Image (spheres, rainbow, N blue to C red):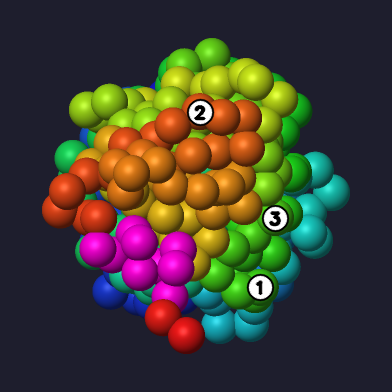
Amino acid sequence: MITVAIIEDEPAVRKEISYLIQEETDTALIGWSDSVRTAVKLIEEKKPDVILMDIQLKDGTAFDLLKKLNVIPQNVIFITAYNHFAIKAIKYGALDYLLKPVDQTELKEALERYRRRSDNNPQWMQQLNMAQNAMHHGDLPESIALTSIHNVRIVAVHEIVYCKGDGPYTFFFLSDGSKELISKPLKYYEELLPAPYFLRTHQSYLVNRKYITGVNRSEYIVLKNKEEIPISSRRKNIVLTQLFPEK
């Protein structure tokens, strides 16, 4: 049986999530809280298997709450309304989240991810800090968490040379010559690695502008390592305008 605690300050949302949990055959709600202050006591006394936690509470944020705990748990699934900056921050840290209103199928999938995850993720604190920093600092953080099949790798954004999409997957090519295969489409990362820092040259390519040295026949981007990245005919004017703006 999976024990669940809900940390949510909107009564209607809390009631709906409680109902969804009761519909699951192997979960049990062991308590709820609507504030940072009371949630600390609930989590430390009840030690729930899963914590469903709103990002913004009435007396602080989920990150404020986690800092107050004696041991920071790795079993948090964040809950958020559709807030552009909050969701981007969560994605930068590769953290698990559910959108309000919470859907039964999405809750099932989140609980299944909990069942499959490793008991100890050494990157967890770094992922939390990345998300928190991204909530408050600009469009592009210093680092991003990439979740591959086997692990989570924290990568400095300036080390990403380019990304190549392959259906539901994305390859990250890094400045040290290594690459990572991530089970998310390129479009997912186009939002997280936005212009003007990164340039979408083709349906399958997203390029870090700092590694671009030139253009070959208006058909290829040339990188510092002499590699050539194709420019699609549909994007040619946009790409050339961004690289060579009229003075």
- Dot 1 or dot 2, earlier in sequence: 1
Q: Which amino acid type is marked by label 3?
A: Glu
As measured in the structure, the alpha-carbon distance from the residue carrying label 1 to the one carrying label 2 is 32 Å
Quarter of the N terminus within the rendering:
top left
Q: Considering only order in the chain, which callout, 1 or 3, is on the residue closer to the N terminus?
A: 1
Q: Pick whichever, 223 or 103, lies toward us.
A: 223
Spot the residue most to the front: 217
Name, please, the residue furthest toward the left.
234
State which quadrant residue 72 falls in. Answer: top right
- 192 vs 143, left or right, is left
Q: Is residue 26 left or right of residue 88?
A: left
Q: Nearer the viewer, residue 164 or 136?
A: 164
Boundaries of the magenta span: 237-245
Query: How many other residues sit within 10 Å of disc 2, few (<14), some (14-19) or many (≥20)?
Result: few
SS label for mark 1 = loop
Q: Which residue is mark 3?
A: 142
User: Is the residue under label 1 in contact with that under label 3 (CB below 8 Å)?
Assistant: no
Residue 105 in the image, given as x and y percentages of width and height? 18, 40
Q: Residue at x 65, y 20 (%)?
A: 177
Amino acid at circle 2 = Glu
Instruction: Give the residue at x 55% y 21%.
Output: 179
Q: Is residue 71 above or below residue 117?
A: below
Residue ID for mark 1: 137
Kindly report the secondary structure that dominates the magenta region of the rendered protein. Answer: helix
- Residue that numbered label 2 is attached to: 227
Residue plotted at (61% across, 74% down):
138
In-image side of 237 versus 110 (left or right): left
Q: How many angstroms separate mark 3 from mark 1 (CA)?
A: 10 Å
